[in-house]
Image (cartoon, helix red, strand yellow):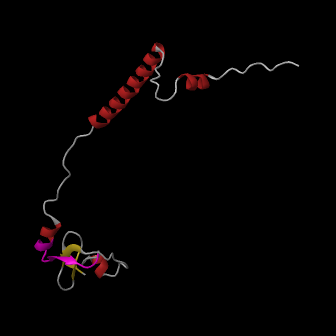
Amino acid sequence: MSRPAPRTDSPVKRLARSAPIGSGFEFKPGRRRILLGLCAAVFAALCLSACQADAGVEKTAPPTPERTPKEQCAASGGQWLMFNNGCLDTCEYRRGQVTMCTQVRKLGCYCKGTRCWNGSRCEDV
């Protein structure tokens, strides 16, 4: 009867047996240089891509209207008030084009009488 050939351990098993967790295992000098070079190359590529992404973008403040909606409301004869729903006094709501409104208190323009707020001024319904 012949004996089976002895099994050779895989490199992973040998590494696990020779370098238990927390033993301070280090790569061989040649492999360590390759790993460090690879890490440096990846880091440099990420930095360059981030710099190029910001290079063409001019950072400016967002444009502001000449007058705020509150000022536009007052100028067109309305009154800036707190409403009990999200439809406010919009023309769509007053004309029956909106069927549902959010149940949240919001500030908006109240245009008196048969007038409604179109988003920038009061107009006739």
User: Residue 40 location in percent, x, y?
Assistant: 38, 23
- Residue visible at 13% across and 60% down? 66
Residue 11 position (above or below residue 125): above
Please state which of residues 74 and 50 is positioned toward the viewer in this rendering.
50
Which residues, given as a range, are shown in magenta?
A: 73-85
User: Residue 122 location in percent, x, y?
Assistant: 19, 75
Residue 33 position (above or below residue 51): above
User: Residue 58 location in percent, x, y?
Assistant: 23, 40
Question: From this viewpoint, which residue is outermost toward the bottom?
Answer: 113
Indicate left or right for 22 with 109 as reference. Answer: right
User: Residue 94 location in percent, x, y?
Assistant: 28, 81
Please state which of residues 35 and 83 is positioned toward the viewer in this rendering.
35
Residue 37 in which image quadrant: top left
Please state which of residues 45 and 36 is positioned toward the viewer in this rendering.
36
- Residue visible at 85% across and 18% down? 2
Residue 45 position (above or below residue 28): below
The N terminus: image quadrant: top right
In magenta segment, residue 81? yes
